[in-house]
Image: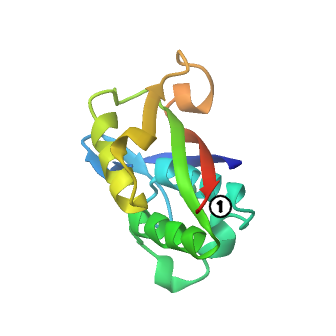
Amino acid sequence: MRVGIGYDVHALLDNTGLILGGVDIPHTQGLKGHSDGDALTHAIIDAVLGAASLGDIGGQFPSSNALYKNARSLDLLKTVVSKLHDKGWRVGNVDATIVAQRPTLAGYTSQMAINLASAMGVKTSQINVKATTTDGLGFAGMEEGLAAYAIALLEEQQ
Ligand SMILES: [Zn+2]
């Protein structure tokens, strides 16, 4: 078994879509990014890549490559998981935490887990997504940006 950690931050901007775990969330602000800015999915991609010693999301999908402009992050995750399978790994479980002051995300985390599990080809019960605030402190609390943490366990395929 192998573990990996992922962390991602995107700036919050007015008049941009907020997509987390592939869920479109109604909000006054969204995430700046070369792709869809899905910080949760990016953190998970980094966690699984880390566990497999495959570098990071920037190395796999360089932002200099126009192919990845406005890319759907769930599609990037699907690509990464198929690389893991090629290397003999399968996803055991993923746990993630989104750090955002607003909006309240509790009502969306189940759908995020469903989307992420589907992209990874695992059961929804293998994916856990949580959300927390920082009590108004720091960049997340000031709503300048949003962060996501993820940890992934990979198992060797039998
Ligand atoms: Zn990102």
Q: Nearer the viewer, residue 28 or 99?
A: 99
Give the quadrant of ligand 1: bottom right
Element type where label 1 sits in the image: helix
Seen in the picture, residue 135 relative to 140 is either above or below; the reply is above
Residue 86 point in image, percent of width and height: 58, 76
Residue at the location (44% across, 42% down)? 126
Seen in the picture, residue 43 relative to 147 is either above or below; the reply is below
Q: Which residue is mark 1?
A: 49
Q: Nearer the viewer, residue 69 or 92?
A: 92
Residue at the location (73% across, 66% down)? 55
State the quadrant of the C terminus: bottom right
- Is the C-beta of the residue carrying label 1 under 8 Å from the nearest atom of ligand 1? no
Q: Is residue 145 visible?
A: no
Q: Nearer the viewer, residue 153 or 59?
A: 153
Furthest toward the bottom, the residue is 66
Residue at the location (50% across, 61% down)? 33
